[in-house]
Image (cartoon, rainbow, N blue to C red):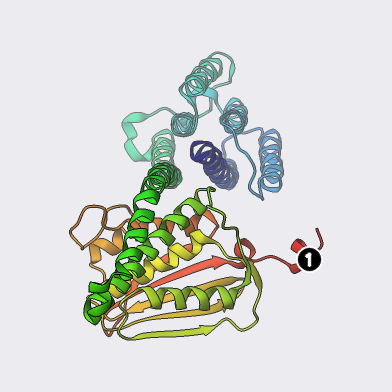
Amino acid sequence: MATQSVTMDAAGVDNVTGHKNMLQLIQLRWIAVVGQLLTIEVAYYGFHIALPIKAMLGVLAALALFNVVSTVRWRSPKEVTSRRLFVALLFDVAAFTAQLYLSGGATNPFIFLYLLQVTLGAVLLSPRATWTLVVITVACFGGLALFARPLALPLDHAGGLSSPYVQGMLVCFALDAALLVIFITRIGGNLRERDARLAGLRQRAAEEDHVVRMGLLASGAAHELGTPLATLAVILGDWRRMKPFMADPELLQELVEMQAQVQRCKSIVSAILLSAGEARGESSVETTVCTFLDDLVGEWRNTRPVQSFAYDNRFDEDLPMVSDSAVKQMICNVLDNAIEASPGWCCLEAAREGDALVVTVSDAGPGFAPEMLAQFGKPYQSSKGRPGGGLGLFLAVNVARTIGGSVYAHNRPIGGAVVKITLPLAAITFEENEIHGS
């Protein structure tokens, strides 16, 4: 499932990148329209070079019309394939070839702007399409040399910059270099952004696979732990009725604490099996958001050595929901990390922000190290220095992400850390008629 999801997301990333690159070509084409119009005007009226200006302006109008249609078509994001980019570049080559044919052919100093199209093709297209474009531009160059009428310019290269031909070549080189730097930089940025997104998707798939493997391992371990925990519970119950323990209040108190911890272990095992779809007689319970949070906090406080704990539930308008063991365990993991970092005090605040439930857990501990914040939510990123450390936050991030939420962490200015969990209400609540009416 993770691989299939990443494949679909990767296709979406490629579509976005292709659309951005098509928009870059549209921008470049508008620059070409304006640049060609200025060049024609300067050559015809400034240098008094005889040009078929009506035909050239007609080609320019066709290029502008094509760009208007392209702008309208690609205004909203759509799938842009390599073939469509090739067709767009091919139209640019055709329009440029027509202009060169009307203005001197191979003797036109701007003929080297073909290299701009070829370079863009090398960046945007597949190797096969790029070589096809190379063959087409070379053929166009050769055809212009054979069939186009030479431009009436004195090829006095010895005149240096005073030569009109050398001046045209200089403008062509400057224009070619500037456009290549601008648009190759932009397109390269689009491709780097795509690669970064794909790398993130691959990392996400690896993390989701890791979560699946951990779930299978936890489910198997829960099965194995069920029998010894039941045996311990029976033995402790027998000990509690024995005279030596009943006669010693301290031993009896320790025995009661042991029974409570064994019961907590059994509850954890049941929660693991419930999350794996293998509940031992329990079923999901219909509740509300406020009741779910209140019960979660009450159970957590009763089973942890909490010294000072602040709880503020500001979720105003209560909504029905089904108690979700994964969400419950996620919040408990964050609370466990907070109380371990700050045994003296921690706080949980719940509120509604728009269409989301926001749970904020704060503590007064040492806070997160900068390198931990940079790798927040990655497995085994922990300052606890023990095997398996960091898995609590890793699981919390993945559970939240699975239902469309997020987990964000930062350090408090006065000391300590804050972990903010945002869960979309649409993913955890339901309309009452969905249960009772269907």
**Where is 373 relative to 41, above or below?**
below
Amino acid type at image mark 1: Asn
Image-quadrant location for residue 263 = bottom left
Question: Which residue is label 1 attached to?
Answer: 433
Q: Nearer the viewer, residue 268 or 97?
A: 268
Position in image of residue 343 (x %, y %): 26, 79
Q: Nearer the viewer, residue 210 or 98?
A: 210
The residue depicted at 33 percent of the width and 34 percent of the height is 159
Position in image of residue 160 (x %, y %): 32, 36
Please, which residue is most extreme toward the right here? 437
Label 1: which secondary element: helix
The residue depicted at 47 percent of the width and 57 percent of the height is 271
Q: Nearer the viewer, residue 250 or 239?
A: 239
**Where is 253 relative to 6, above or below?**
below
How many marks the image carries: the answer is 1
**Where is 72 relative to 316, above or below?**
above
Image-quadrant location for residue 337 = bottom left
